[in-house]
Structures are given as structure tokens and as C-alpha cells.
Image: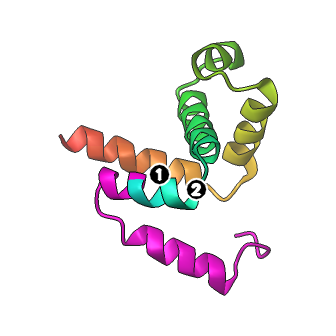
Amino acid sequence: MNKKIKTPEVDHLFEAVLTLQTLEECYTFFEDVCTINEILSLSQRFEVASMLRAHKTYLEIAEKTGASTATISRVNRSLNYGEDGYDMVLNRLAERTSEK
């Protein structure tokens, strides 16, 4: 974990996020906390991570998401050398999907 972001304020924010129970609550909260562009950027990075894990090429990812190769590369670096946060969530989503 990056010690630069581990602060009481970030803990408070993450505790707040953990209280959200529905997609509608997430929309309501994140529209207040973030700009539309910030939300779209976060969702784009998450889609890029998902596509990289599905072994899509940079070209396929760029065409589908509109992400720059720099963004794709940055997400790829996080997938390979980060804290495994993307993989943790992608695996949980895959499990949830397979249970349905």
C-alpha cells in the first residue's frame, strides 16, 4: 500500500464508500464527490484493466475505450507491479457473475 495516501482523511472517504449499498447510491455519492470527467476516467481505467486481463491488444482497447496508449500502459503497469487491487475486484466480479 502506498503510504502517501494512507491518511485519516482517506480512511474516512473509504469508510464512506463502504457504506454504499446500491448502484444508485454510488451514482449519488460519486456525482457529489467527483466531477463527471473524474468518474469517466476512473471507469475508463477499470475497463482498460478488464480488457488487459482478457488479453486484448492495446489497439483493441484504445478503439473500444478511447483510452490513450499512455493510459493503457499505466494501467498495465499497475496490473503487473501494483497492489493487485484491480485483480482482487475483477476476480470478485467474475465470481459474482459465475454464481448467477
Q: Residue at x 76, y 42 (%)?
A: 77
CA neighbours of label 2 inside 10 A, class few (<14), some (14 to 19), many (20+): few
The N terminus sits in image quarter? bottom right
Considering every residue shown, the one lying at the far left of the view is: 100
Is residue 25 magenta-colored? Answer: yes
Give the residue pinned by disc 1: 89
Q: Tag 2's secondary structure?
A: helix
Q: CA distance from mark 2 to mark 1?
A: 6 Å
Q: Residue at x 59, y 55 (%)?
A: 34
- Give the number of marks: 2
Q: Is residue 9 left or right of residue 23?
A: right
| Span highlighted in magenta in the image | 1-27
Q: Is residue 62 left or right of residue 11?
A: right
Name the spot of residue 64 as percent of width and height, x first. Answer: 57, 17
Name the quadrant containing residue 8: bottom right
The C terminus sits in image quarter? top left
Give the residue pinned by disc 2: 85
Name the spot of residue 43 as percent of width and height, x first. Answer: 55, 40
Q: Are marks 2 and 1 in contact (CB under 8 Å)?
A: yes
Is residue 17 magenta-colored? Answer: yes
Between residue 71 and residue 54, name the one nearer to us: 71
Q: Amino acid at mark 2?
A: Gly
Q: Tag 1's secondary structure?
A: helix
Q: Residue at x 75, y 69 (%)?
A: 2
Considering every residue shown, the one lying at the far bottom of the view is: 8
Name the spot of residue 98 as percent of width and height, x first. Answer: 25, 39
Name the spot of residue 9 as percent of width and height, x first. Answer: 64, 81
Q: Residue at x 37, y 72 (%)?
A: 19
